[in-house]
Each structure stands twice: as C-alpha cells, then as structure tokens.
Image (cartoon, rainbow, N blue to C red):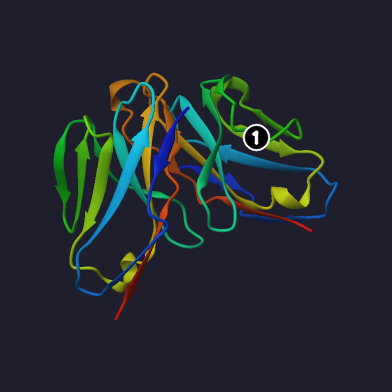
Amino acid sequence: GQSLEQPSEVTAVEGAIVQINCTYQTSGFYGLSWYQQHDGGAPTFLSYNALDGLEETGRFSSFLSRSDSYGYLLLQELQMKDSASYFCAVFTGGGNKLTFGTGTQLKVEL
Amino acid sequence: EAGVTQFPSHSVIEKGQTVTLRCDPISGHDNLYWYRRVMGKEIKFLLHFVKESKQDESGMPNNRFLAERTGGTYSTLKVQPAELEDSGVYFCASSPTGTANTEAFFGQGTRLTVV
C-alpha cells in the first residue's frame, strides 16, 4: 500500500519561511504533488514534481528526492492567507490513482 | 470550462436514512475519484473510476456505500443506511489520463451531517 507522512502542525510568523516535509512509501511512484485546503474549501493544486530537484512557482517551491522518497513544500514571505492545510499526494497505480498524505495544518501568526 | 461540480453542498439526514451525492467531473476527464475528510483530518481515498469502471474501491468503508458512474460521465455515491460516523466532507475530483495526469481538480465538496 501507500503511506505518506507529514508533520501534523506547523506554526510560523508572517513574513517568515516555512518548510513542510513529506516522506512516502509507495509502489509505482509517478510523481509528488502538493495541495492546499482552506477550511470549508476544496483542495487546490499547488505543484507537481516528477523529477528530482526544486520547482519554483512564485512564493511556493517544491522539492523532490526520489532516492530518499522525500519531498518538501517551501513557502516564503508567509502571509496570513497561507494559513491552511497542506497535503502531499502521489500518483500510483499506473499513474492514475491519487493518494494523499496525512496533512499539515499551517498557522501563520502576526 | 466548468469545473468539477458536486451536489448537494450540504446535507443533514437522520441515522438510518439514505443520501445520494452527485459529482459532475470536468468534461473529458476519464479519472474520477471520491474522497472523504472527517473532522479536519486526512483526505481519505474512497474509490477511483476510470470511465465507467471501478479501478480501485479499496477505500470504501463498507457495503453501505455504493458508487456508480453510468456512461462514464457523472458519478453518484449513495450511503444507505447512513450512520453517525459517515459524517464528513465528501470530495469528488477528476483528472485526465496518460502523461497529462499531473493534477486532480476538486469539487467544493458535500458536507454530510448524520444526526
């Protein structure tokens, strides 16, 4: 089966940088994704890494190391609106089944 | 282009009753997923359709849950009879197949409360 582990909670101050880690054990790995979910909202896609290395999209960056089965989401210049749950997720099963991690609740404080 | 739509957005039913949730995926997306999030915890996989076929239903809690996707378009998830522990937010998502499958698109969810 698949398992993806994340820290349950992270707290940081506005303007800071925070890193949310994800370690995974899967069969047939195709890529690591990150999703953001605000309370009461739908999960929204942030990034996808198929290859090792860092992908940057504005204030958010995502990193993958396939050899270590590890990735992280880096959020820079934190804003209050970044307070949300963040999930890593993997496509397996021929590349079409999406399984989510345990989720990290990010709290941004003044 | 319309996104993934779910109906209803909220449902409050009594224990023992039946509820049917509906999901309309993005047109052309062969993959359709159902997930549940309970009390702010993890997004738990329920099942995965490829077109009208159930590819993986390993996450379905028990036989009170029945999902269908007739014709490979919209999908329904029926809970019968509902129990208190079925409460949660049920999300549907869709994605294309093949090398373009890097992102799943989620609906706004159905918040189910069983009382």
Question: Compared with residue B88, is residue A5 higher up or lower down, i.e. above or below?
Answer: above
Task: Tell me where residue B58 appears, x and y as whole percent.
Answer: 59, 27
At 25% from the left and 42% from the top, the residue drawn is A71
- Binning the other alpha carbons within 10 Å of mark 1 as few (below 14), some (14 to 19) or many (20 upward) gives some
Q: Nearer the viewer, residue A55 or A2?
A: A2
SS for callout 1: strand
Residue A13 in the image: state x and y as whole percent. Answer: 26, 75
State the residue in front, A52 or A7: A7
Quadrant housing residue A80: bottom left
Quadrant (top left, top right, bottom left, bottom right) of the N terminus of chain B: top left
Q: Is residue B41 left or right of residue A62?
A: right
Q: Residue furthest front?
A: A68
- Let me know if residue B27 appears in the view: yes
The residue at 21%/38% (across/down) is A64
Residue B26 in view in this figure: no
How many marks on residues?
Answer: 1
According to the image, label 1 marks what residue?
Answer: B76
Residue, x 16% and y 43% (percent of image)? A55
B104 sits left or right of A70 in the view = right
Amino acid type of the residue that numbered disc 1 sits on in the rendered structure: Thr
Residue lying furthest right = B16
Report in which chain the residue with disc 1 lies.
B
Q: Quadrant of the C terminus of chain B?
A: bottom right
Image x and y of residue A58, in percent? 16, 56
